[in-house]
Image (cartoon, grey):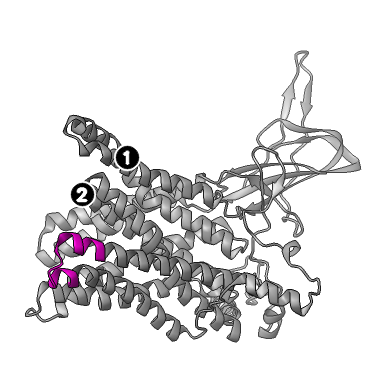
Amino acid sequence: MPWASRVMGDLSGTTVILMARIITDASGQRYQLDEPVPLSPAPENIRLATESKPWKNYWRMLGTVMLAFLIVQFGLASLIEGALAGDAIISVIGAICSLAPIPLLLILHKPKLVHVRLAVPDAKGKQHHPLPEGGSLRTVAPTRFKRFLTPDDSVLDLPPHRQVWLVFSLTVATSAFVTLFALSESTEWLFMLLFILLVIPLWIMGFSIPVFAWWATSSKWIGLPTRRRDAEAWLIAGMASAFPALVINTWIFPGILPSSLSSASTEFLLLVLSAPLGEELWKLLAVLLFLPSIKSPRHGLQIGFTVGLGFALIENMSYVLMSTFGGPIGLGFTTLVRGIGSIPGHALWTGISGFAVGCLVEDHDIDKRIRWLMRRLTVDVVDAAENLGIDVDGDGDHSGYDQPRGSFEELLSEVDSSTSSWMLIDSKTGEARDADGVATSQDILTDLVTSSEAARYRSEDGIQILPPRHVLQAYGLAVFGHAIWNGTSYLSFLIPEWIGLGEIGVLICMLGWTTILIASVLWLTHRVLSTVRRMPMLV
């Protein structure tokens, strides 16, 4: 078993001139120390591991959405509002709120390299190996020492989904518990005190924990090995797609509607047309940003589901914030309904679109065609620059691109290595393990089964639901599902009010229909994810 240590950090890549290291002992004797082993290329067959800290990703997600919310809601939205109103002060505030969080976002998600030191047992090796920062590594037996840099491809490490759902349940229960003190005049002061103390924590946990719970749940159900930086990029893309959707819903669509429409008609059209069409379109475009990296329908659904969670996260932040003005009962109810209904709905609709994009990639090798075009563009740029007398590759001549150019057929035959080879180290046992729920090659069974066993497996699996393979059909289905949720939710309140059922009747109808919608979305989400998980794993 080799000895290895790694240092996380940013490495600038600047050239360093190593000077001879000389020390003088107490008697005045001078000694020249050995120079550290130079960096070498990273080996292809090595597998690294990092300590499992699943809740660290929650804090990264929370910090990201706070900054994104500031940019979208207070920055870009204020810029547009100021421009439309001709108010320079609002525009300046919007510009500040748009630009100030960007450095913090870059710091939070800056790419990192890992400096790996590897000592492999070798009878002809040494027991002391000098290190570049000073000192040395001592091993108990002779070893061969090497150092290399590799990108931080840590796997997505999320806590067990039941653990996160428990936190979500406690959040809703706390809101309900605080409400109990408002039922009696003698404890009203305690109700006010508790609500003032808990409103901010309940708001933060109310909008973020359910998204984190669905992230952990979907990662386990889909079961694909995923790099953390990839998953975070999908989540951020979903957050970014909220801004153009906000522009459509707030300014463009209301501006094209006739002014003669009633407020109820305007709101209904906004819910069943503008929101589904615009939001699902921009979420689909966010998925298409990752077209070169999508490998299969299952992978496409994973990306789409995570993009939808990113969109729901920043939207949920606004809704739960507004619900705080309704007291703990309004906050708890909004947290519950959106946590088990709206959030999986957003994720499911975009996941359906992502599945179809994955089918498109699988059927036509879109990902490899894009990589081929990018490779050809790189070659052409280098050739053009060197024809102008610029030595781009630093080889001392102007002969153009000197590396093997390859062919599209060779690219098609390449084995993809984009998935992370990293593992996790359990903080309690110290043993290496894969992420929770991730399917590995060892999980794929090849035993033959009888026809009766196959029938039993199918009956245990339940109803299988596979999304459409065509992108336009999938987008249409996503829009339809979104419109059904929005439109019927609004009508479940409006129609009982029109026919004069009274406040209690309206409340019963609204809660009853909301329960049906939530149950339907949860069932569909489980069936779709379970069906897609059983598809061949190509990534």
Q: Residue at x 20, y 74 (%)?
A: 268
| Amino acid on which the number 1 mark rests in the picture | Phe
Q: Quadrant of the C terminus?
A: bottom right
Circle 1: element type: helix
Q: Quadrant of residue 279?
A: bottom left
Counting other residues with Cα less than 10 Å from the Cα at mark 1, is it few (<14), some (14-19), or many (20 or more)?
some
Which is nearer the eye, 486 or 76?
486
Q: Which mark is residue 326?
A: 2
Q: Is residue 269 above or below residue 86?
A: below
Instruction: State the CA–CA distance, disc 2 to disc 1.
Output: 15 Å
The residue stretch that appears in magenta: 495-509
Q: Earlier in the sequence, mark 2 or mark 1?
A: 1
Q: Magenta segment, principal secondary structure?
A: helix
Give yes or no for residue 487 being in the magenta stretch.
no
Q: Which mark is residue 177?
A: 1
Q: Quadrant of residue 260?
A: bottom left
Give the image location of residue 432, x and y in percent.
71, 47
Q: Is residue 234 left or right of residue 387?
A: left
Give the image location of residue 481, x and y in percent.
37, 76
| Amino acid on which the number 2 mark rests in the picture | Gly
Circle 2: element type: helix
Q: Is residue 478 above or below residue 345?
A: below
Q: Is residue 366 left or right of residue 124?
A: left
Q: Quadrant of the N terminus?
A: top right
Give the image location of residue 310, x and y in percent.
41, 61
Instruction: Check contact, mark 2 vs mark 1: CB within 8 A.
Output: no
Give the image location of residue 531, x and y in percent.
58, 73
Q: Residue at x 50, y 83 (%)?
A: 468
Looking at this rendering, what residue extends furthest in the right direction?
123
